[in-house]
Amino acid sequence: MKILTANRLTDGIAVWYADGGWAETVGQADLAHDKAAEDRLEAIGAKAYADNEVVDVNLIDAEVVDGVVEPVRLREKIRAAGPTIRGDLGKQAERAA
């Protein structure tokens, strides 16, 4: 399975394509289960890049854990959670609040 990720151009925040827009959390990202769905997500990412909405657009490997979409690679897990040196900052701090 794959999901589409990027960084929002206005503030650099990591975002994931979900439900017709860009979400700040990975949990609801649209999953591509086959090549046709991957191609669809890539086209969406290319258009968003061309429209100067996002940069660093990538399809990444994902899995569903306990009903929630999660990235597979450590790099992407860190992008989804936030800084690794300060647990009181980033997306991990928002989840704790």
Image (cartoon, rainbow, N blue to C red):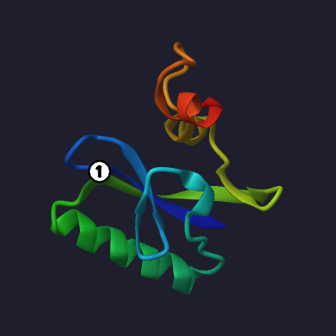
Tell whether 48 sits left or right of 27.
left
Q: Position of residue 85 (x, y in %)?
A: 53, 13
Q: Give the class, few, some or many, for how many residues have Cα within 10 Å of label 1's Cα (few <14, many ≥20).
A: many
Q: Residue at the far bottom: name it.
A: 36
Residue 83 versus residue 1 in the image, above or below: above
Q: Residue at x 42, y 57 (%)?
A: 58
Q: Position of residue 42 (x, y in %)?
A: 40, 72
Tell whether 65 sits left or right of 20.
right
Tell whether 2 sits left or right of 47.
right
Q: Residue at the far front: name it.
A: 97
Q: Position of residue 86 (x, y in %)?
A: 52, 14
Q: In which quarter of the view is residue 3 placed?
A: bottom right
In depth, the one of 74 and 86 nearer the eye is: 86
Residue 54 versus residue 39 in the image, above or below: above
Q: Residue at x 51, y 76 (%)?
A: 38
In depth, the one of 36 and 93 nearer the eye is: 93
Q: Amino acid at mark 1?
A: Arg
Q: Residue at x 25, y 74 (%)?
A: 47
Q: Position of residue 56 (x, y in %)?
A: 32, 50
Tell whether 48 sits left or right of 30.
left
Quadrant containing the C terminus is top right
Q: Residue at label 1?
A: 8
